[in-house]
Each structure stands twice: as C-alpha cells, then as structure tokens.
Image: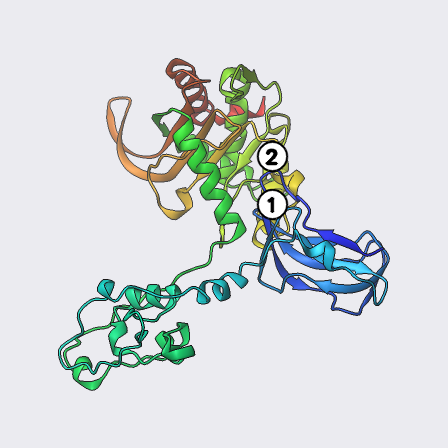
Amino acid sequence: MAIAVKMPKMSDTMTEGVIVDWNVKVGDQVSSGDILAEVETDKATMDLENYDKGEILHLAVGAGEAIPVDGVVAIVGKKGEKFEDLLVAAPAAKNDMEAIVEEKTTVDSKSIPEPLVGTPQVIAADPDTGRLKASPLAKKMAEEKGINLNSISGSGDGGRIIKLDIENYTPAAAGAAVQVGQESFEDIQLSQMRKTIAKRLSESKFAAPHFYLTMEINMDRAVAARQRMNEMAPVKISMNDLIIKAAAAALKQNPKVNSSWLGDRIRINHHIHIGVAMAVDEGLLVPVVRFADNKSLSQISAEVKEYSAKAKDKKLQPEDWAGNTFTISNLGMFGIEEFTAIVNPPDACIMAVGTVKDIAGVIDGEIRPTKVMKVTLSCDHRAVDGAVGSGFLKSFKALLEDPVTLLV
C-alpha cells in the first residue's frame, strides 16, 4: 500500500517546516534511509529521511513552501497505486492561499477613495449591482501602494481587477506630474526561526514578571589575565569565554539563580549548562555549553567557536541547543554599553553583557584610566528574588575583578 511521508517534529518548538529543496522527483525509486529533502525548521536546516521502499508517487509541496508538523509532504508506493485518499487531510501549501484569495469576489465601491485630479477613470463595475469588481488581494495591494482602483482597467473575468493589474499599473502622466517622491517597502517572509523567536519571547516577556539588576565591573585584571593566557593557551581565549567561565563559577556559589519556574514548583538545577546567544541572519540561536563549571577556558573557547561555525551554516542539531539552565547574551562586540535581555525559558535568569570600555576611574583615591564593563541580570521574579540575583552579580563581579580565582 502507498505510504504518506509526513513532516516530522524535528525540535521541541517546531510547528511547521519549509521544504528548502527536494532531492527526489515523482517517479524516482527510494529506499529506507534515503534523504528526500532538506527542511528548514525553527532552529536549523535538517534532512527529511525516508523509511519505506518504493516509488515517489506524489510530492505534496514545492520548494520554498511550508507544511505543518504531521502534514503529508510526499507519497511513496508502487507505480500506479491510488493515493488520493491519503491527501484528503493534507493541509494546503501556503502558496495556494493566494489563488484561494483571488477567487473571492467584490469590494464595495464606497470604500474606494476619490480619484486623483486629472487621472482617467476606467471603472470595473458589475452592471447588475454597481459594485467595483476587484479581488481582495488586489484591493489590499492597491491600498498599500496608494493606487486608486477607479483608475485601473481589470484584465480578469468581466473586467475584474486582479493582482497582475496592480503589479503592472503605471500612473497616468497628469497624476505622475504632481508626485515628488515614491513610497516603497519590502515585505520579508518570516523564517521558521523568526516565528519561533517571536512566539517564545512574547510568551516569556508577558508571562514571566521580569526585573533587572545592573552592575559595573572593573575589568583591568581580566583584560590583563586574558592577554597573558593567550600567550600560552592552545586556542585563543575571548573575553566572552572568561565571562562564561565566571558565570558558571558564580552559579555554583549561588545555585538558586540556576533555576527554572515549573508552575507548581521551582527546580534548582545542580548541573550548570550555559546557553550562549548567537546572532545569525534569521535571528538568534542559543547553543549550550554543558557542565561549564567543570571545563577549562580552552575547552569553553573551542566549544563556543565550533557552535558559532555550525550556527552560521545552520548545522546545529537539537542536542546542541537543548538543556540550558542559564543564558548569556553578549552585545559588547557591537559597542553596546548596556541593555536588557528577555529571559530565555526554561531559565529563570539571563545576563546581558555590554562592552569593555575605557573611563577615568577613581582607584585608591586617585583618578586613573581604567576599563569597566556593565552587565544586567534579567530575572523571573517568580523563581528568583532581588537579593538572590544581587548575590550572583556580587560573586560574578568578584571573580572577574580577580580572575586568578577562576583557575582554582
């Protein structure tokens, strides 16, 4: 019997996948283990694997189209087999929606703005009802572009204005003469990653009561220690690596910050898995440095560099971004001095890190040049109180201001 290949759930937050590219076509023979397509999820581009032997009888969606988890994406079976019943419950691809919209009918002519002076009028009206005949999509496009539908001759059935008429419309010379500029815009289709970022962070921001704690840290010794370490370290240690290591040590001293709100209880995590926010073209990924408190600076540096390369190539796998107990978001490399971040569930806290900058500071009663860095801890007040968060920042500050303590 023919088998429906369905969109698998490739991550815990995935609701739909986009077919990036098909590796097969209708009529191809496939076996178990063959890769049918590349699928863009909310976190990465992953392979869609086949588990049945047979011929590709049908591809339900094209490249670039999205389909929900458990939606039918392809049919595998024997040549000539009937498979239509398997498609009855299959959702329509997104690109089909425009055609559906175009089949809708009319717009009340009262909702159309008055024509520009000097603009010729060619009205596509239904002779029986007097209503302007235009598809809803055409009306929406005309409104966005500032085009008067009364000035357009429709090319659809019975003179109906459709999408193509709006795209091909050129203003008359008399109307164009009064224009001093042209409005324009670009709509960017949301990636699966951006949709998930919007959903999860909205849920976090509006469900978790946030509060924020900011502290300034003297970085003179940390900068000097990093320079000395890089003279001997097998890999180059970044300031971010030092921050991760110091955060892990501070979490060990303040375990209540290393927690999660679970609705009816608070979970204090005994392991320390630090999520490291990384910017990519489509948004933000947060791979996880596991057991960061037990790793050396060189190990942390090598791991973060590997994650960064995989994130840029969209090669991170589900196990790379799962399990965080605390998150660090560092925008210091962009020159940002101070900012607040939204808690990254299931964590109770996230620390926003600013740039290391030179100031004139007072040290031992004297004004001297010094380096400082500001960090802001965002806390879910349901799990972490102000005194607890402050204790963490106090420990974190002490560790970076005397970084030799990170090595013992």
* Residue at image coords 66%, 43%: 9
Q: Position of residue 95 (x, y in %)?
A: 53, 63
Q: Nearer the viewer, residue 377 or 154?
A: 154
Quadrant where the image shows the N terminus: bottom right
Q: Could you say whether the residue bearing mark 2 is in a helix, strand or loop?
A: strand
Residue 142 is labelled as none
* Comes first in the chain, label 1 or label 2: 2
Q: Is residue 211 left or right of residue 303?
A: left
Asked if 202 appears above or below 103 in the picture, the reply is: above
Q: Is residue 384 left or right of residue 134?
A: right
Q: Could you say whether the residue bearing mark 1 is in a helix, strand or loop?
A: helix
Picture quadrant of residue 133:
bottom left
Q: Nearer the viewer, residue 186 or 111?
A: 111
Quadrant where the image shows the C terminus: top right
Say which residue label 1 marks. Answer: 307
Local packing at callout 1 (Cα closer than 10 Å; few below 14, some 14-19, many 20+) is: many
Q: Nearer the viewer, residue 23 or 280?
A: 23
Q: Residue furthest bottom?
A: 173
Is there CB contact under 8 Å for labels 1 and 2? yes
Q: Amino acid at mark 2?
A: Val
Residue 142 visible in the shown view? yes
Residue 289 is labelled as 2
* Residue at image coords 75%, 68%: 26
Q: Position of residue 287 (x, y in %)?
A: 58, 40
Asked if 359 appears above or below 252 in the picture, the reply is: below
Local packing at callout 2 (Cα closer than 10 Å; few below 14, some 14-19, many 20+) is: many
Picture quadrant of residue 304:
top right
Q: Is residue 264 left or right of residue 215?
A: right
Q: Position of residue 396 (x, y in %)?
A: 45, 23
* Residue at image coords 73%, 64%: 58
Q: CA distance from mark 1 to mark 2?
A: 9 Å
Q: Position of residue 112 (x, y in %)?
A: 23, 66
